[in-house]
Image (spheres, coloured by chain):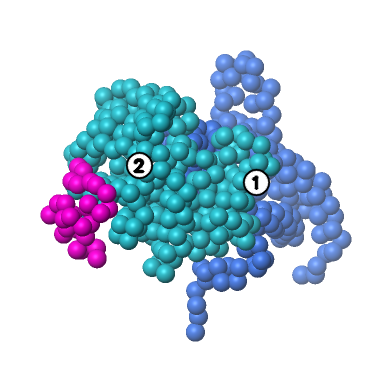
Amino acid sequence: MSVDIAFIGDTLVQLLHALPITLLLFAASVAVGTLLALLVVWLRVCDVAALRHLARGYIFLFRGSPLLIQMFLLYYGLSQFPEVRQSPFWPVLREPLSCAVIALALCTAGYMAEIFRGGLLAVPPQQIEAGRAAGMSGWLLARRIIIPIALRSCLPAYSTEIILMMKATSLASLVTVYEVSGVAQRIIAETYRTLEVFLCAALIYLVLNFLIVRALAWLERRLSPRHPVLACPTTKKYALSVPRG
Amino acid sequence: MTTGNDPVLQVKHIRKSFGNLEVLKGISLEAHEGDVVSILGASGSGKSTFLRCINLLEVPDAGEIRVAGEQVAFKRGRHHLQVPADRRQVDRMRPELGMVFQSFGLWSHMTVLQNVIEGPLHVQKRPRAECIDEAEALLEKVGMADKRNHYPAFLSGGQQQRVAIARTLAMRPRVILFDEPTSALDPELVGEVLKVMRSLAEEGRTMLVVTHEMGFARNVSNRVVFMHQGVIEAQGTPQEMFNEQHSERFSRFILSHA
């Protein structure tokens, strides 16, 4: 089989036209999902038992069932109820794009809430007590001490989650959103050239995720305490590596 | 408000249980301006819990706490447990009772200088320039001025504890509570922290020190309190306590720590 450069170039151009939709799906669902996750984790660790159980139920529901089924239920399932079709939310729920964003955001919020909770649990209690002893409480304590420390420790898990989200945007093609994967499938339906088209699509996702990984690694480095004299602590950097030989 | 001879800290009949275990069985203590009180006792005698009850990191089940004449207000909460009635009063009074912890508790995401100015700047809302000037003077005093831009992770235990002391002083506390400040340190680092504490005592600071350092209790403090199983078993000046064989238990305790 010879490589058809012209076809691949043409495919890439077509796929790149769908890139804004993929990026919109990704950015909107990560942003909404993160805000929702903050709310869920706040409920999850609050003092009221009923709210804690509510948050736990939410996490169980959206982590425990397939994202694809959640998306189908939201897009195809809800429209069967006349009440939904007559509700003020219908203009939003009618659109495949907004349904995909909502489904992605609801699902990722369940995962992110657990990631954030892990970050909160990783805050050393001594540092919280030191804050209390200095007269901090409530929002001040959260803003100055707990959140910055928690954020740092949950960043690696959070970046994994948003990489998964970037790839999960491809599911939106199954509720008729023409993002990169959707367009790829349309090209395949027209040309029957599965291999080249999907390879092109995979390449685009790889490049996008490469950029995300680099950006988050930069953020992680920026948020980590550094030695003011030695810019890179040579031993600590490799503290987790396994000695060989 | 305090007049000449009123104690700056007055604690009466503090009780505290964890489940069925009664850790504090009614402890009372007073400290006047400039007092340095060493609290000694075996592990499990309740001395750390007592210190933590004073600034309400643990809420005592019963008892009174009075700082510079102002009494902490309590109310009955859930399960009939006592809880502070007014969070703002607690937040206001805690910095008056500066706390130095066994495990330092420096904020890991802040540099040394940021750790020291955090409280004055964000809790007491003092002007930034003033906070920085005062923080630099305090870091100078504890010998940590050259490390002002370091993060805690890059400091030794002794250095971290000295920064923690500077952080506590920056809040201008009336009383400083030390909760085993040298117990987590390597032996060769204990001296540098004790030296700082001794200089604070010489400045006339009011200090309550839970410690295992017999030398500090004997030579620096002006009062020694010995706790045993949740009660104060004996107390007095270091001369009385160490020379006159106050209590049989205390004598045995000293022998085991010699």
Pinpoint the chain carrying mark 1.
Answer: B
User: Most extreme residue toward the right, as rendered?
Assistant: A6
The Cα atoms of the two marked residues, 2 and 1, are separated by 29 Å
Q: Residue at x 58, y 31 (%)?
A: A74
Identified at 51% across, 45% down, the residue is: B169
Q: Which residue is mark 2?
A: B52
Q: Specify whether residue B210 is in view.
A: no
Q: Colour of chain A?
A: blue
Question: Mark 2 packing: few (<14 Cα in 10 Å), some, or many (20+)?
Answer: many
- Please tell me whether mark 1 sits on a helix, a strand or a loop: helix
Q: Position of residue A94 (x, y in %)?
A: 67, 26
Residue B13 appears in the rendering: yes
Q: Nearer the viewer, residue A110 or B140?
A: B140
Q: Is residue A40 left or right of residue B31?
A: right
Give the residue furthest to the bottom.
A245
Q: Circle 1 is placed at which residue position?
A: B132
Mark found first going from the N terminus, 2 or 1: 2
Point out residue B125 in the picture as x, y percentages from the top left corner. 61, 34
Specify the amino acid type for callout 1.
Ile
Residue depicted at 56% across the width and 20% down the height: A81
Nearer to the camera, B155 or A103 = B155
Q: Which label number is shown at residue A165?
A: none
